[in-house]
Amino acid sequence: MPEKFLSDNIRRNISNYRKVIGLLILIIISSATFLFAGGNNFKNSQKITPQNPEIQSQLILNFLDSAQSAKENYNYDLYLSYALSALSEAEQINSSYYVTKGLKTVGDAYYYKNEFRNSITYYVQAVDAAASLNDSILTADISVELAFTYVVNGRPDSALLHTYNALKFYRDKDDYSINKSWCYRILGDIQYSLGNYNKAQVFYEQGVGVLENEIEKDSLKLRELSMQIGSVAMVLAEQKKLKEAIYYYKRSDSIALLCNAKDVVVGNKYGLSYAYIYDGSYAKAISICKEAIAYFEATNDKFYLEGCWESLGRAYVSMGQLDSAEHYLKKAEISALQNNAYEFTKEVYVLLSLLYEKKGDPEKSLSYYKLFKEQSDSLFSKNKMYQLDVLEVAHILEASEKEMKLLEESSQTLIAAQGKTNILITIALSLAVISAVLLAYLYHHKRNKSKILQKEVDKQTAELNKANVSLQVANAELQEFAHISFHDMREPVRNINSFTKLITKKGKNITPEELEEYTSIIQLNAKQMQILVYDVFEFVRIDSEEKELNTFSPDELVNDVVKLLDKNITEKSAVVSKQIDIRNIKSNRGMLSVALRNLVENAVKYNTSLNPQIHIQMHNGNDQYTWYVKDNGIGIEPQYHDRIFEMFKRLHNREVYQGSGLGLSITKKIINKMDGEIGVISEEGKGSTFWFSIPKVD
């Protein structure tokens, strides 16, 4: 990152010089103040706030240098204190430049303290401040810092936005190869955090390529190159390409040693420990991981310490050394909870559940399994998956920009060609008055034909662009669908298998209460699997469904939907009313039935009222039909109104409300296929009104 990898010698020389100058200035100011006041107010003059902007600028530089020195000594509390002092002084003299530097340094300090939310707050202000200075370089550099922080804070969508903003600035500039490499590393980190290891590898290798093409490499570029190669090794290990991963880790180490980047070498040891674990070389993994821990404890790096403890726990569990595994996994759990590393705790809970199962302690195993389930089903732990659509759309937009550029170039070529034709016609007209009428006729005929041809070209180009975007969206949707459905299908199967083994293991010693609890969990997962398979079938079937139109009574359609859901409605003692003012409509009855059924089923399911009420209404507009399904249920907070229509998105734990998370996604897909729109009006605790409109057809 910018300013984080400056040469130690240069930094120390600058720091010492500024400190000496600053000390002399403070002595002069103190003496002058004392003489002027006659020593009468000595107690009040101990804290001196110079009003000279040049002097305060020097004080700011001193604070920034002291902050840097504190960081080098791993004293991050002191680092933050000096950074805040620099910012305060900058605000007093109203220096936009130093305020920007101060905001950025405070953001850096919070980053090193692992307080990422505070870091983001100051980085965002720093980006805005740099932009107001019209300093494109500083804006881009701070945007990269902010993007790095968003990645580790589980906000890949925001990280992507700031990375692309920075990359737009760096892309066409030859002197910013290292900055480009940072951007590619962030893009790789985003894809890695989402589990897209192939895509992550592509971005990491792009970053490597940018730096390898450099003829001369300083220590900063060598450091970044070693980190990029280490990132390639990391994704290769995740893909179980262990020999390649080990080769790249060693290559990264050799480059890091050239620039004395010890932290990169130690970080590689941590990454290499996972490669050895995947390879079954547990003793090697434990050995190098303990070497890394010694360094990270000295540098107070909590982020890497948590990872090392988890890695050691994983290795010891695999070796059957359960007491050692428990020691390190509990340390990882406590630290992760203190640092709000929710996604990381999920991995620790899985290992602890397995650990206690091996120790013969089913109660603790079940307890940690439930914690894992709660974490898995929470919106926070699924936050990364929520961003997948945003990331894929960004790539589609980038591709669309390229296509539009090509289309513009093609248009310019056509215009130039038409201009040449016009010149030839003008010359021909000037040669003979007799042929003027004939040439004019030919010209107009050709022009009309060209317009017709151009319209056809424009039409086909638009259709191709539309088809291309649809294909890319479908591809992104398919990737997300495959990834999440595999995860959601695998989980119930694993749960059924685990609790069946637990029942078998306990045998005759199992109590009736335990048997009832375990079998209820098995039944719950089996039912979840059944629901998921049915909804997956419905979701896939929509794409192949033809837009078959038929005339039918909407009133009868509602009656049929209510009959299908009679059991659900009766169990909740719900009352369903309707208001349909038109006798017949023309539409796809089957698809409309599925959409209404999903909305009414949700209205019944998510209703805890003592007197559940569901009202179905259809409005006959000028050119469309609008349907409303209103309930007095639990309601939905406004910030979740868009998310609920995404695939596999749930706002509640499955133990409370069963389902696949596909119902509203299926409904939206149906309405989109019918060229309609869908939305919701709701507040938490005040019920919901789902609506959709579909165009009338002749």
Image (spheres, rainbow, N blue to C red):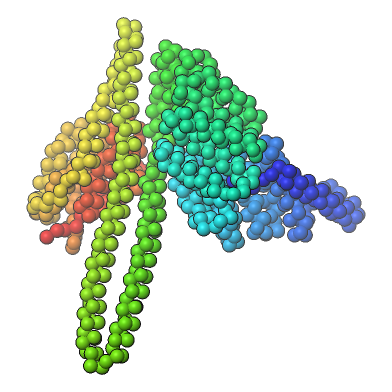
Q: Looking at the image, which is closer to me, 491 or 206?
A: 206
Q: Is residue 116 above or below residue 433?
A: above
Seen in the image, is 332 located left or right of residue 429?
right
Q: Looking at the image, which is closer to me, 52 or 60?
A: 60
Seen in the image, is 483 located left or right of residue 340?
left
Residue 578 seen in the figure: no
Q: Residue furthest bottom?
A: 433
Position of residue 412 measured from the top left corner of the image (x, y, whole percent): 37, 70
Residue at x 32%, y 13% (from the top left corner): 503
Residue at x 56%, y 39% (from the top left corner): 227
Q: Is residue 625 above or below residue 82?
A: below
Position of residue 232 measured from the top left corner of the image (x, y, whole percent): 49, 37
Q: Residue furthest top?
A: 508
Q: How many marks?
A: 0
Residue 583 seen in the figure: yes
Q: Is residue 371 above or below residue 665?
A: above
Seen in the image, is 298 located left or right of residue 35?
left
Q: Quadrant of the C terminus?
A: bottom left
Position of residue 24 measured from the top left corner of the image (x, y, whole percent): 84, 51
Residue at x 19%, y 47% (from the top left corner): 616
Position of residue 57 measured from the top left corner of the image (x, y, whole percent): 73, 56
Question: Which quadrant would residue 351 be assigned to in this image?
Answer: top left
Residue at x 29%, y 90% (from the top left corner): 431
